[in-house]
Image (cartoon, rainbow, N blue to C red):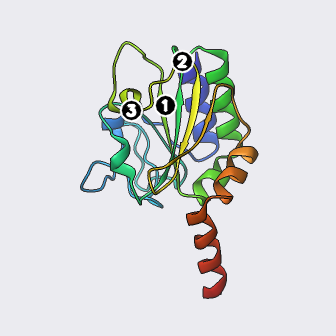
Amino acid sequence: MFKALAATAMFAASLAAPASAQAVAPVGAEGVAPVGAEAVAPVGEEDDKPAPGLVITEAGEQALDDFLWLARVLVIFADSENDPRFVQQMENIMERSDELFTRDVVVITDTDPSVLSPIREALRPRGFALVLIGKDGQRYLRKPLPWDVREISRSIDKMPLRQQELQDSRTRQ
């Protein structure tokens, strides 16, 4: 149910949600899509030029260290992709994905507690959980309920590294 909804909404919003972490390209040397890189449609649905947008991927074999100093990571855990909280959170993300994209956020989903992914092992969620990790690897936010992207963006904007990025962008103009 959610995958069909997500695929339709993401393509409408010029986003691409890969079916698995292995379907994402282009990738960097460590298997992480470069920040600011174009999101790519699932394998078999590629166009000549992929649409830019927020990268949303499944946890798979990725580790949090893969994103260190490259991207902020927003991890969404649930015991099932049909969990109403998970569905609500993903809808919130898709409605305002551009705000997360401009803040160098990569969204990672993990909806199978029976598969102990490296990220699930590191963060040890119980049921639904939203975890925001900064570029420096620090865990800044952990919530048991869905959050609006506006609230997530405010939390990101309070991070010291984000403050520095904003200051640097102002001085270049």
Disc on res. 51:
none
The residues tagged by marks 2 and 3 sit, at their Cα atoms, a distance apart of: 20 Å
Mark 3 is surrounded, within 10 Å at the Cα level, by few (under 14), some (14 to 19) or many (20 or more) other residues, namely: few
Q: Residue at x 40, y 27 (%)?
A: 120
Q: Position of residue 109 (x, y in %)?
A: 48, 31
**Marks 3 and 1 in Cβ contact (< 8 Å):** no
Q: Quadrant of residue 115?
A: top left
- Amino acid under label 1? Thr
Q: Mark 1–mark 2 contact, CB under 8 Å?
A: yes
Q: Is residue 102 above or below residue 148?
A: below
Kind of residue at disc 2: Glu
Residue in view at x 67 percent, y 54 percent: 99
- Of badges 2 and 3, the one in the foreground is 3
Circle nearer the N terminus (3, 1): 1
Q: Quadrant of the N terminus?
A: top right
Q: Which residue is mark 2?
A: 81
The residue indicated by pointer 1 is 109
* Residue 123 x, y percent position in the rendering: 44, 31
Task: Looking at the picture, tell me which residue is in the foreground, 3 or 35.
Answer: 35
- The label on residue 122 is 3
Whichever of labels 2 and 3 marks the residue nearer the N terminus, that label is 2
Q: Secondary structure at mark 1?
A: strand
For label 2, the SS is loop
